[in-house]
Image: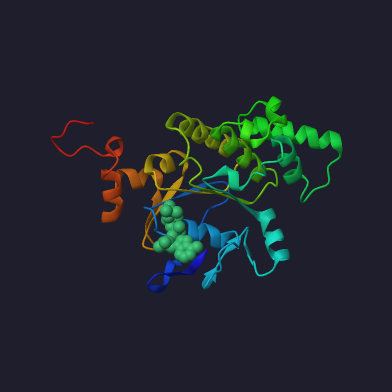
């Protein structure tokens, strides 16, 4: 995307929640987007999937400019980009079993006969680390982590060109978070996913990202390969973010590593 601007209206009038942002997710890689609450990450994600109107700028997916003016545009866009949000309950219909939800998503853009559909559901559940035996369960019969994995499988079912993960582990217990992050790493290896991984937890974002962009007040203050960002952050705000995570801090001269 280049020069992307999204305006929001707050108590003090209209402001740029995303202010001229240019970012690139090279095919088959994951770009992390990190920043504190209110920095504009979700507004940016919403703009890419056509849920939030774009004031100016361009969004290209697989080299083609996206349009999300009509319902038909948005439906087409869904083939190219999918988003998974923090709360899986918004994505999952409480009356549909995991298997039904996945079968529905797998057949939105593709015709599959009954046997192929069942096979695809099993494959999708395995892909996200779930036992295919869970296909008959309703969302409320699954744990939070399992629901998030179903939401992930549902997004993957359409084989999107870009997957956006917006704070997908934030609502999960710490141990479940780690396991979902490892599943993401497995998916990257197996599917060659192109992903925008959004979060406020720097270690989690770094764990799954090839490069990381740091967002503040609607602007990107620094973008760098993950290793470079951790080793030699350039922007003072990135340094502040790093310093707030003790295990990521580079020990200063004379200081014992933590
Ligand atoms: N629907 C909305 N209407 C008006 N303003 C909004 C809306 N959603 C977000 N904002 C405002 O836009 C700014 C950016 O919010 P956004 O949710 O994009 O940030 P974020 O980095 O994703 O934060 P969080 O992690 O808390 O979701 C904030 O000032 C927020 O209050």
Q: Is residue 4 above or below residue 197?
A: below
- Furthest residue toward left: 254
Q: Residue at x 54, y 35 (%)?
A: 144
Using residue 231 as the reference point, say whether residue 3 is left or right of it: right
Q: Quadrant of residue 156?
A: top right
Query: Residue 115, image x and y in percent?
Result: 85, 33
Which residue ends up furthest to the right in the rendered image? 113
Q: How many marks?
A: 0
Q: Nearer the viewer, residue 195 or 136?
A: 136
Query: In this view of the protein, can residue 22 be seen by the observer?
Result: no
Residue 99 is left or right of residue 66, and the answer is right
Residue 252 rendering spot, x and y as whole percentages: 18, 39
Q: Quadrant of the C terminus?
A: top left
Q: Residue 106: image x %, image y %? A: 74, 44
In what quadrant does ligand 1 lie?
bottom left
**Residue in view at x 39 percent, y 58 percent:** 39
Counting from the top left corner in percent of width and height, residue 125 is at: 67, 32
Identify the residue at image location x=37%, y=72%.
Answer: 12
Q: Quadrant of residue 13?
A: bottom left
Above or below — where is 173 with respect to 51?
above
Horizontal relation, residue 93 to residue 217: left or right: right
Q: Is residue 53 above or below residue 26?
A: below
| Residue 124 visible in the shown view | yes
- Give the color scheme: rainbow, by chain, secondary structure or one colour: rainbow
């Amino acid at each position: 995307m280049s020069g992307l601007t999204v305006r929001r209206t707050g108590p003090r009038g209209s402001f740029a929640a995303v202010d001229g942002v240019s970012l690139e997710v090279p095919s088959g890689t994951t770009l992390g987007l990190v920043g504190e609450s209110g920095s504009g990450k979700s507004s940016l994600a919403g703009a890419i999937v056509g849920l939030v109107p774009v004031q100016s700028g361009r969004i290209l997916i697989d080299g083609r400019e996206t349009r999300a003016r009509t319902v038909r545009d948005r439906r087409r866009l869904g083939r190219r980009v999918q988003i998974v949000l923090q709360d899986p309950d918004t994505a999952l219909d409480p009356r549909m079993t995991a298997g039904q939800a996945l079968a529905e998503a797998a057949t939105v853009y593709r015709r599959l006969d009954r046997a192929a559909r069942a096979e695809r559901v099993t494959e999708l559940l395995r892909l996200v680390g779930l036992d295919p035996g869970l296909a008959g369960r309703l969302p409320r019969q699954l744990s939070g982590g399992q629901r998030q994995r179903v939401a992930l499988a549902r997004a993957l079912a359409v084989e999107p060109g870009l997957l956006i993960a917006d704070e997908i582990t934030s609502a999960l217990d710490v141990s479940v978070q780690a396991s979902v992050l490892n599943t993401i790493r497995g998916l990257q290896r197996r599917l060659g996913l192109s992903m925008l991984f959004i979060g406020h937890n720097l270690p989690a974002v770094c764990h799954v990202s090839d490069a990381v962009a740091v967002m503040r007040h609607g602007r990107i203050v620094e973008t760098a390969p993950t290793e470079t960002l951790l080793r030699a952050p350039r922007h003072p705000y990135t340094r502040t973010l790093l310093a707030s995570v003790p295990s990521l801090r580079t020990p200063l001269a004379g200081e014992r590593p933590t």
